[in-house]
Image (cartoon, rainbow, N blue to C red):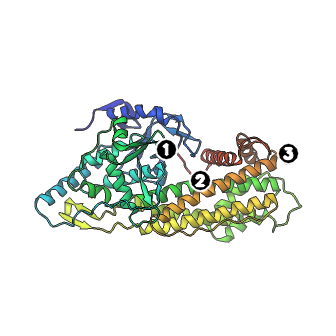
Amino acid sequence: MKAPFAASNAVKGAFVPADTMARLDKDRSRSARWNLRGTTDGGYLGSAEPVPRSPPGGTMVSFPAATVLDPSGRLTVAMLESAALPLIVAPWGAAFERVRRGHEFAVDCRANGRPMRADSSLPQQTGGKHTKLPSAVVRAAMLARTWTLSRGFSGISFSSYEALRAALETEFVPLVRLPLSTDAAEKITLTCIAESLSGTGEAWLDETTWSAADALEELDLAPVRLGPGDASAMSNGVALAPAVAGLAAASLRRSLESALLLSALLGDLMGVAPDFLVPKLLENFGHAAATMEGEILRDFLLDANPANDRSPIDLSSVKRVPQLLGAARSAVDWAVSMVEDDLNGVADSVQFFPDEDLVAYGEGLTEQTTFAANLLSDVATQVGELAESQLGLLLGSKKSGASAHPAGTPVHAMVALEQTRKLRLAHGKLAVALRRAAHLRQSSGRTSLCAELLDTLADVVGPIGGERPPDTEIREAADALDTFVVKRSRVEYP
């Protein structure tokens, strides 16, 4: 039976169950210190009022108090980021019916003795060094798996599905440790999630390691008793690789916006003439994305006052920006389409089709995400090298970035996420240098946009020789850039 609805908590036409709101209200005291983004597309239903929060190592922007997602819609990479905070995956409507029918059919198949491939055994944790998956990655994988289970092809019981869905409404994070080299990362991750929901293993709560049982009790979540086939349904799928690649893509999209803004600020401070941004010149290049980047950069530099003491060769790291970022944007858009197709597809090793009276077997592959993750790594590396070369121009030295060598799914996606993290820090470093260069030159920026960006950076970048650690200023400058991008970007962000 469905939980009673709290009509007073209706969000854009979606009614939120009363027990869901109670869990969210309890979590808000913890979540008040966090600050990631909500979503405005795909399966998004709505959100409560925005509240200011500040995530560990995250972006300083506002996040809705309760994000509501409809699993009948399309899961997007932007929505994956919202899973870092408690959110609601709507437990009513078509998803409920699909899960129920799929489970009933699976039960009938087993009761009637239909030959089926045996449930895979749970992978055993091996010895040696392990790495702890970041909480945001585990939560994104939980959301991705919930979305797949909502399709109703896994045969999972509604009680097990509900346990995963309800955990997303809280700050519950299963503790997942992966061997540094493994070909079973997907299965280990999903198994750890399933075991944690049943009260086995460990969880991460309030920045502390808890036993899973204690964490569930603290959050008023009942340990789930996995029924026949539920362990297999929970773990014999794909979630980690597309979730990680999706987080990387979402971060990289913001970094491309930062790259364009920082290039405009550098061009403004260096007195770059916008003659390389002539509309017909951009059109003749033949790439729509490069033309778009050039047009936006031209708008940024529209009222710039060019200097005459720089040669075009000196400023090549600015003048090739439209072409490089145009290519990067096209590549990221393609990668996002591949990752989102995987997020919204079903790659379970056992799938139940009630309407066709069919049980079919897949292989759990994510080849599209593998290609996409490699491409995201390449883009992050190239844009990072652009930032390093621009920093070298500013400091009068030559810089070069390191190349990435990704290998092994879902390691491909983890490498891509790490590359995007390094790119954010490279932009933070460039932003600090640009702010100090403007201070030394007593320049507030020739264009209104650059002046606004410098004012934003001045809030987090102190004078040369100040008492604040350089790493702190770089991280805060990267956060400030993200906030600035979200406020001003032509790309729709939550």
Circles 3 and 1: CB distance less than 8 Å?
Answer: no
Circle nearer the N terminus (2, 3): 2
Residue 384 picture location, percent across and down: 65, 61
Give the position of the N terminus as an image quadrant. Answer: top left
Given residues 282 and 7, the one toward you in this image is 7
- The amino acid type, in three-letter code, at marker 2 is Arg
Q: Residues within 10 Å of mark 1 (few under 14, many from 20)?
A: many
Separation of marks 2 and 3 at Cα, in angstroms: 29 Å
Which element is circle 2 on? helix
Given residues 467 and 348, the one toward you in this image is 467
Q: In the picture shown, does residue 144 fall above or below 376?
A: above
Q: Does the rendering let one see residue 229?
A: yes
Q: Residues within 10 Å of mark 2 (few under 14, many from 20)?
A: many
Q: Which residue is mark 2?
A: 254
- The amino acid type, in three-letter code, at marker 1 is Gly
Residue 274: give its label: none
Q: Residue 223 is drawn in which quadrant?
A: top left
Q: Which residue is mark 3?
A: 442
Q: In the picture shown, does residue 32 fall above or below 111?
A: above
Question: What residue do we see at 40% from left, 45% from top?
Answer: 203
Circle nearer the N terminus (2, 1): 1
Circles 2 and 1: CB distance less than 8 Å?
Answer: no
Question: In the image, is 24 to the left or to the right of 245?
Answer: left
The residue positioned farthest toward the front in the image shown: 127
Separation of marks 3 and 1 at Cα, in angstroms: 39 Å
Q: Which residue is mark 1?
A: 38
Separation of marks 2 and 1 at Cα, in angstroms: 15 Å
Which element is circle 1 on? loop
